[in-house]
Image (cartoon, rainbow, N blue to C red):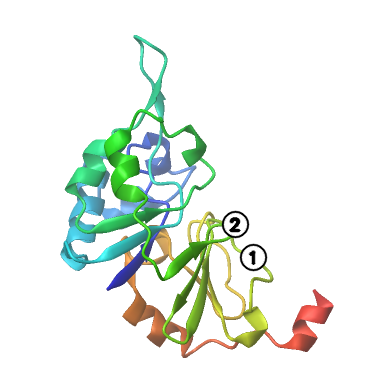
Amino acid sequence: MYFFVADEHFGHEKILTPEYSDRAAKMNVANVSEMNEKLISNHNERVTPQDVTIHAGDFCWYKKLAKNGNMYCGAEEIVRRLNGTHIFIKGSHDARLPSSAKYMWRKMLKVEDTLRFGSCGLAAGWRDQFIVVCHYAMRRWERSHYGSWQLHEHSHGRLESIGLQHDVGVDANNYYPVSLVDLVEIMKHKTQHTHDELRRT
């Protein structure tokens, strides 16, 4: 089974402040450690060791270590605790992920033969369904007028989707990953782009 998730922001203290988001209240957590534990628990509640999770960016936050100035977020420790195999798509904060995190990169970059990376994120064929995954929402995406989906995040649930598009971030999905089975049902209630709509945008 495939799952999709994004914007977990593991270790990001600011995301729990009222001026940044209402995540602390909605998750009923008092600090970033509680948030981390709840996100890990939610992930493992749905995702089995045999499943594949596609993370669409902003996996964790980064802090400078006092001794050597390197960026660190505990990414390796978090990944070790998450069920399944993981495919990682960089978001707006992930460019600083330390190259020394060898375990994380080894586990996070396992790509199935049926998947291919595009210029922005991931383009994947699943049975008869084409899916484009990117950290950022798009107005147009590959094959959008032929019924393809676009899965995104970055907006923390504050952006209205268009066409066959869905926000897979934790803030928009009750802080859980979204399964491919769930997405099939979600997309049944949406309308795909038409050629006329694409000409006007």
Image location of residue 169, percent across then percent down: 42, 60
Q: Which residue has dot 1 on it? A: 138
Q: Where 179 falls versus 57 (above or below)?
A: below
Image location of residue 32, percent across then percent down: 29, 38
Q: Residue at x 63, y 79 (%)?
A: 144
> Going from the N terminus, do you reach mark 2 or mark 1 first?
2
Q: Residue at x 76, y 79 (%)?
A: 198
Looking at the rendered structure, the secondary structure element under dot 1 is loop
Q: Are marks 2 and 1 in contact (CB under 8 Å)?
A: yes
Q: Amino acid at mark 1?
A: Met
Give the spatial CA distance, label 2 vs label 1: 10 Å
Mark 1 surroundings within 10 Å by alpha-carbon count, few (fewer than 14), some (14 through 19), many (20 or more)? some
Image location of residue 52, percent across then percent down: 29, 64
Mark 2 surroundings within 10 Å by alpha-carbon count, few (fewer than 14), some (14 through 19), many (20 or more)? some
Answer with the quarter of the image where residue 137 lies: bottom right
Q: Where 48 falls versus 99 (above or below)?
A: below
Q: Which residue has dot 2 on it? A: 120
Q: Where 66 falls versus 8 (above or below)?
A: above
Answer with the quarter of the image where residue 27 lies: bottom left
Image location of residue 126, percent across then percent down: 42, 79
Q: Is residue 37 left or right of residue 23?
A: left
How many marks the image carries: the answer is 2
Q: Amino acid at mark 2?
A: Cys
Looking at the rendered structure, the secondary structure element under dot 2 is loop
Q: Is residue 103 left or right of residue 99?
A: left
Q: Where 25 falls versus 34 (above or below)?
A: below
In the picture, which quadrant includes the N terminus? bottom left
